[in-house]
Structures are given as C-alpha cells and as structure tokens.
Amino acid sequence: MRKSRANKPLPTIPSSTYVNFSQLLREQLLTDPCRKASYLSEVFESKLIDGGASASPDVRRDRAIDKWLGRELVNRATNCRIMLADEEDFLFIDSRGFPVSARDVIDWCRHQITCLLGEEIPWERLKGLFSGGASTSVKRGVGTVPRKYQDGTNITSSAVMAYMTIASQADSLPHDLEVVEGNVMFTVPKTAEIDRVACKEPEINMYCQRAVGEYLRSVLKKKGVDLDDQKVNQELARIGSIDGALATIDLSSASDSVTTQLVTELFPFEWTTLLMDLRSPYTHVRGAWHRNEMIASMGNGFTFELESFIFWILVRACSYFTRVQGRINVYGDDIICPVGLRDSVEATLEFFGFSVNSEKSFWDGTFRESCGKHWDSGVEITPFYIKETPKTIPDWNHILNSLRKWSALGGVCDPTYYDLWSLFSELIPISLHGSSDLERKDALVRPYMRNVAVVRPLVKVDDKLKAKYQVGAYAQWLDATERRSPQVDILPATEQFAFESGLVVRRVGRRIETWTRDVPIFPQECGDN
C-alpha cells in the first residue's frame, strides 16, 4: 500500500508575481483593437479587494451593513405602502388605455400564484435538506453538511411545528432543539469598495427553508422557468443583443427587498404562514437584534426561489395588462423581458420596493448581460475578474484557466495571449497540467499532454470528518440517495498537502484523462501533439 505524504506545504507565490502579470496583461489588452479586449481592461480588477485603490476590510464591511440597514428603512416604507394600496395607486396604462393600479396587479398575481401553488401546503412533497453554507452554530467548510445533520440544533420558535411535520419524513435528524431569536449577519467580499451582506440561518430553519425552496423551484420548472439552468437567460441575452427585442434587467439589493407585506398580499394564507414561520424574524447585527422588514436575506434557504417566483409573476402581470408579447424568464434578480414592457415593469417594481440597477440593466443598444454572460451584437465579450491577489497554486490555476477561456473563440484561443499564458503556467507543477474543465481551480487546463500519465486534482478535505461525523455523513447520504444526488463529502485520499490556514488539500484517487482534445487550444500548442 502506498504511504501518504501528509502535511507537505504547498508553495506560496509572491504577490509581486501578480503585479507583473497584471501589467503584462493590461499592455497586451491596450494593443488589441477588439471590443472584448477593451472591455476586459476596464473591469478585470474592478473587484480586486486587496489592490492599492481598494477600501480597507472594515470600511467595506461598514458600508455593506449601512446599506443593508438603509434598505430596511426603505422596506418599512414599502410594507406600509403595499398594505394601504388601493385603486388610486396608478402604475401604468394597459392595452386599452385604462390605468392599471397596484391593487389590480396584486389581485392578478395572487390569483395566478394560488392557481400554481394551491391554497393548502403539500406537506408530503416538502423534503428538507441542508446546504453547505454556514449556519448559526456550524461553520462553513468541508464536511459542513454532515456536521449539520449530526450537530445542528438551532431553530426559531415559530419554525418548530413546521419542522416537526417536515422532519417526520426524514431518515435521521437531530431531536434536541435549541431555540434562538434569528439569524446572524456577516459580510463577504464583493467589490473593492463594498462587501456583500449575508446571514447565517439557524440550521433547522435552513433545513425546512430548503424544502420550500425546492418545491417552488419545481413549480417554476413546470412553467418553463428552470432555476437549475442559467443558460436559458444567457442565450436570451445573446438574442436580445442581436435583435434588440429583449431587455436584460438587474436589480440592486433584490433579495433584501422582498418585504413581508408583499408576500402576505401575493401568496395564499397557508403559504404566507409557512414562509413567515420559517424565516428569521430577527437578525443579530452590530451586537443587537434587529427586527426584519424583509421576508428573508441572502443565506435563507428559499430566498433565491422566492424572489425568482415573485419577479416572474410581477413581469407577467405587466405583460398581461399591456398585451406586450415576448419571452419572459428569470433567474433570481436577472430578468429577461420584452423591451416594450420597460415603463410598466419599472413602475411596478418600484412600487413594490425594488430598485432597477440602471448601470446593469439594458433596454436598448447592442449590449446585453445576464447570469454572468456579456454580449455585444451577438458576440460574447464576457470578462473574467481578479477578486484577490493570487498567492497559491489553485489561485493561479483559476487565473490561467480564465485567461484561456476568455481568449477562446470557436475552440481556438487568440495566439497573441499565448506567451503570457505560457510564461505564468510555469508556476504550476507539471503534475497538475492537463485538465479539460476551465472552471477548475485544482488543475490547469492544457491539451495534448504526452508526458503526464494522470492529473490528480487538489481537493480540500477535513481529516476529522472521517471519524467524528460518520453519522452525519450517513444521514446526508440517505437524503442524497433519495434525491438521486451523488454529492457526498467523504473522499478517498492518496496524497495530502497543508495550507497555512490549517485546511488539508488532498490529491484524490480520481483521475483526469490528459489527452484532452475538447478544450480551447492556442495554435502554438498544436506542436505538442
């Protein structure tokens, strides 16, 4: 049996290496006349959180929390406005020239949602599950899901009854519960100027929230809105950049703007009750408990599906009253709709408390962007972003794979960027060359590798998981098996490397074929074959 080499430290790459890369890349982009290159030069460091022009971590965090609290003041006003909405709250003109009120939109949407969901909760179809995100008592990391199954006990008092019903269908869940007030705020890097706010939910609430989220996802899928596939929005954005008939809309702080009163007005009574019971009524922020005006923040297990559902139904209401025809699709707050709906959609979203991001919404011209894909007259110009100065081999894998992907068109990479890619690929050990997946950080994409037998990608694994959380891992496996999902956190190891953070990086036994011919190739690489 081969003896593992544990705790062999991975080399750290000096930050000066990235300075050189950035300078060389920018010089190359400035000599490239195409729109794609000029666009990348404008934005590739716009999210760099540790660059010379970026704000300090404390400043970014304070700005994010202040923005979140400011949004809650807006939400309070929105709740009052929706509660008092009547026929006098004019929004837009319908196809006959008559005014459409907020109450008209609410009534139409409520009828449609009731037809889709029904008046009663289909409890037998609500299957709970845990996600890999952090919760109030379980930190995010490898093995998070088994640890939640085994150790997770936090729940809000309002969620107990719903949990007992949903958990009665589960194979193995905690029986001891600890009641908490709500969720806990934290921030993560977003841009060089501001962080992004999210909240750690009580894990048992999250288990039930995911059950509701998955059900809403299934209902939308039956109506042609597939939240498992971003490619639909991406393709519609491409089409819109060509014919100009479809707009792409992005909202600011969308998930933090779905208010409790909006949900109360739009959803049947039992569904509203369930959503309100499973949410966190309070958020712990800056040492105090804040009473939430929003229904849920990022981190809640049904936030994404609920906001998608609401945006889809509101835009459809605008189409119904104006009789403007065309494709409507949503993916979270990424909205696709006919450009003819501009006035009605903007007015409706504004009344119900949402802010259209004018810088990232495109109604005219030849540029469209949705779900991470950027198009100009049908040509993809999607950039890549450097969010933090790369210091490790996985960081550089990601940058070099991103450069290859960006420079590709029709399976062939722009040869002018090969020298740059080749120079910095020497940072990566040869044993990690040869992957075919451009999204990977654990191996470098490079075709036609003759001299390397296999690639063993790097994967973060917590050794303690194997022994301590076997019960939790088994419970996760039972749920995953029931959903026909292959995702289980236990991985076999042959070689291990340690990061300074204390996490372990393993080379797992899974092999990657190295004769990869289905990846974008630089013309200069043809000689390697």
Image: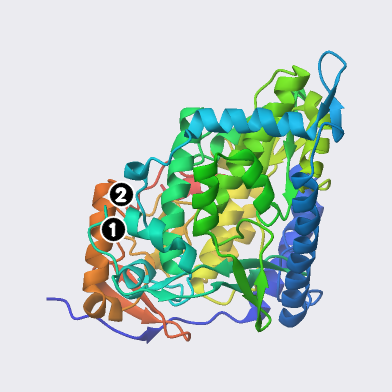
Crowd around label 2: few <14 · some 14–19 · many ≥20 (10 Å): few
Asked which quadrant contains residue 43, the reply is: bottom right
Crowd around label 1: few <14 · some 14–19 · many ≥20 (10 Å): few
Q: Can you tell which mark lies on residue 272?
A: none
Residue 331 shows up from this direction: no
Q: Amino acid at mark 1?
A: Arg
Q: Tell me which label, 1 or 2, sits earlier in the chain.
A: 2
Q: Can you tell which mark lies on residue 485?
A: 2
> What's the distance in space between the residues labelled 1 and 2, CA to CA?
21 Å
- The residue pinned by badge 1 equals 511
Identity of the residue furthest to the left in this view:
1
Taking depth in this image into account, of 145 and 236 the one nearest to the observer is: 145
Number of disc labels: 2
Q: Is residue 235 above or below residue 454?
A: above
Q: Residue at x 56, y 33 (%)?
A: 113
Taking depth in this image into account, of 511 and 476 the one nearest to the observer is: 476
Q: Is residue 270 above or below residue 58?
A: above
Q: Residue at x 88, y 16 (%)?
A: 97
Instruction: Please give left or right for residue 91 compared with residue 494 in the image.
Output: right
Label 1 secondary element: loop
| Picture quarter with the N terminus | bottom left
- The spot of residue 402 in percent (x, y) is 58, 55
